[in-house]
Image (cartoon, rainbow, N blue to C red):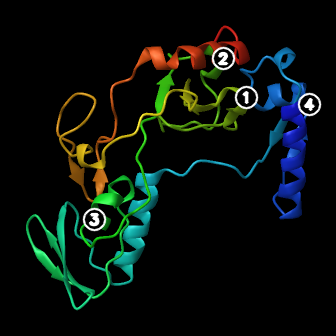
């Protein structure tokens, strides 16, 4: 009941900012996300415009638009240093070249602290490992219209179980389960390199897109046990 009251407060807050949202009954929640057992919930908060951004595709689209406007995009350039003179930057050094520049914008994400350190700047960011598991194919999701050939397509809303620090999203005919309730797993950005990966193979970059995620670390089942039990309670027999 306390969480439901909090969701009602969020509904009012979203409405005040013009974001369409709805408080849903247990039956309505089950219709929106058919894997939910409506007898196990009191209700839900639904924001139809909520969604996921595909980061690699999004950044690639931005790079393409910039190139169309005259920007020069060079893929596969590992930054190794930033030159400075008179308290200002003068250039960027990569593993293979050097580029003059009077303005440098850091868009390095999890590697941001490494770029900041090159100019004596502390970037307040700590990369964290995240426990995420996928189910095997589920009959309930087989043949759902609109999925097409995209292996990461989703039709149902993203489901968030905030009492248990969990979220669920579709991957076509499977469900991905993400957990935040486990022990903190900070990563040293110096250890997130192109040589990392789930199979130890070097990650390759092509046209600005990575073919694997260099930040992925080995899954630890013991850290996921409590989350898995909570997931089975909300989505029984799935």
Mark 2 or mark 1, which has the lower sequence index?
A: 1
The residue depicted at 31 percent of the width and 78 percent of the height is 104
Residues at circles 2 and 1 in contact by the CB criterion of under 8 Å: yes
Q: Nearer the viewer, mark 4 or mark 1?
A: 1
Which percent across, then down, holds residue 139?
61, 14
Q: Quadrant of residue 99?
A: bottom left
Residue bearing mark 1 = 163
Residues at circles 2 and 4 in contact by the CB criterion of under 8 Å: no
Which percent across, then down, holds residue 231?
64, 18
Residues at circles 4 and 1 in contact by the CB criterion of under 8 Å: no
Residue bearing mark 4 = 25
Residue bearing mark 2 = 230
Disc 4 versus disc 3: distance between alpha carbons? 51 Å
Alpha-carbon neighbours of circle 1 within 10 Å: few (<14), some, or many (≥20)?
A: few
Depth order, front residue of 12/185? 185
Mark 4 or mark 3, which has the lower sequence index?
A: 4
Which percent across, then down, holds residue 205?
23, 52
Disc 2 versus disc 3: distance between alpha carbons? 41 Å
The residue depicted at 37 percent of the width and 69 percent of the height is 63
**Residue 117, disc:** 3
Q: Secondary structure at mark 4?
A: loop
Mark 2 or mark 3, which has the lower sequence index?
A: 3
Which percent across, then down, holds residue 200?
19, 31
Q: Secondary structure at mark 1?
A: helix
In the picture, the quarter occupied by the N terminus is top right
Q: Would residue 77 be seen by someone viewing this image from the given angle?
A: no
Q: Quadrant of residue 236?
A: top right
Disc 4 versus disc 1: distance between alpha carbons? 18 Å
Answer above or below: position of 148 versus 89. Answer: above
């Amino acid at each position: 009941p306390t969480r439901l009251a909090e969701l009602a407060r969020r509904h009012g807050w979203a409405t005040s900012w013009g974001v369409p949202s709805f408080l849903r009954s247990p039956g309505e929640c089950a219709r929106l996300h058919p894997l939910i057992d409506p007898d196990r919930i009191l209700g839900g908060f639904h924001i139809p415009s909520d969604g996921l951004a595909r980061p690699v595709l999004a950044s690639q689209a931005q790079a393409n638009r910039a190139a169309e406007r005259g920007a020069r995009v060079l893929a596969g350039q590992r930054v190794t240093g930033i030159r400075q003179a008179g308290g200002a930057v003068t250039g960027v050094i990569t593993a293979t070249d050097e580029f003059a520049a009077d303005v440098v914008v850091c868009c390095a994400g999890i590697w941001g602290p490494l770029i900041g350190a090159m100019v004596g700047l502390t970037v307040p960011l700590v990369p964290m490992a995240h426990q995420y598991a996928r189910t095997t194919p589920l009959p309930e999701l087989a043949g759902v219209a609109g999925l097409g050939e995209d292996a990461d397509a989703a039709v149902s809303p993203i489901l968030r179980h905030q009492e248990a620090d969990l979220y669920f999203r579709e991957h076509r005919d499977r469900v991905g389960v993400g957990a935040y309730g486990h022990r903190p797993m900070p990563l040293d950005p110096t250890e997130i390199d192109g040589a990392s990966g789930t199979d130890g193979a070097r990650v390759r970059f092509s046209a600005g897109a990575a073919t694997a995620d260099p930040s992925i670390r080995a899954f630890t089942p013991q850290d996921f046990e409590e989350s898995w039990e909570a997931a089975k309670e909300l989505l029984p027999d799935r």
